[in-house]
Amino acid sequence: MALNYRDTLLTAVGKNLTVLVLGITINYINATMVHTFNKHHIFRMNPRFILFIHLVFNDMIQLTISISLFVISYTFHTIYVYLCCLFILPAILTTQNTPLNLAFMAAECYIAVCIPLRYNNICTVNRTYIVIGIIWTLSSLSVLPDVFILLATEPLEFFHTRVFCLRDTVFRSAYSVKKRDASHILFLVVVWLTLFYTYFRILFVAKAADADAKKARNTILLHGFQVLLCMMVYVQPMLIEVLTYLFPGSAPSANFVMFTINQILPRFVSPIVYGLRDKTFRKYFKKYLCTVNCHPRRAVKALS
């Protein structure tokens, strides 16, 4: 989530400004989507948009923390372990939430297309919020063992030492590493099986001429692309090693490129999936976005 290397002052300033501009832009777009969702009852009563806006809000938290760690890595380089934990824990939770949220969104698409007569009975607002609770519970259960292992294996003095803030520098026990790998594999296998199953069921069950079915298939493909981007986090060290081998002396650039692809690009894809592809949401979203951009004096009124 942060980069453990040193750059020249000019290069460091350029990279930090690039990351900050991208992060602020994406979070501004996402915040406008959250505002659009909250302003209109039609979206708050739709399970599809509830799951979508949860994904957007989750991405805002994850992106803010990742960029904060990026800047900290250049400004302070190392911080106290107990402070690092305050950043790392929510970062891990939100990172784990993303593929689970995408899996449930794919399941919602499947129900809407393949069993539409039961959709209103299965996909209710209350059940959607229960699903969101399940997402956070599963993510919490995946990280809580790391916290217990940390408290059981590390002396109290460790929390007052300074480290470069990464998951592996805090949860450095061999048990935590094995548990992390196992949970990643389990989560990704379940998510990919869900995506494949829902995609092919929609492909074979729905009529080829059905526009809604085609849109649902394309949506699940985009979910798969998002999950693929999320998976790159798990193979980032290997990819950096390959890039460094192919382009000797390019380790800083390779780290920066991988950070941008792994942490920023997936957050940019989320608004496109529903926010810009859905005609109804896009109509209201463009109104608020244009209000802020085209009429600065009305921005405060529109967002109040």
Image: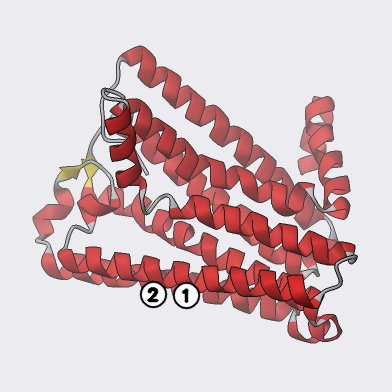
Q: Which residue is mark 1?
A: 137
Three-letter amino acid code at the position of disc 2: Leu
Q: Is residue 228 above or below residue 201?
A: above
| Apparent side of residue 165 relative to residue 157 in the rendered image (left or right) | right
Mark 2 crowd level (few <14, some 14–19, many ≥20, 10 Å Cα): few
Q: Are marks 2 and 1 in contact (CB under 8 Å)?
A: yes
**Residue 257 image offset from top left, x and y in percent:** 43, 33
Q: Would you place residue 153 above or below residue 288 in this image?
A: below
Image location of residue 79, percent across then percent down: 24, 40
Circle 2 sits in a helix, a strand or a loop, which is it? helix
Residue for point 50% across, 25% down = 18
Q: Is residue 21 visible?
A: yes
| Residue 114 lies in quadrant | bottom right
| Quadrant holding the N terminus | top left
The residue lying at 49 percent from left, 74 percent from top is 190
Vertical comparison of 155 with 144: above or below:
above
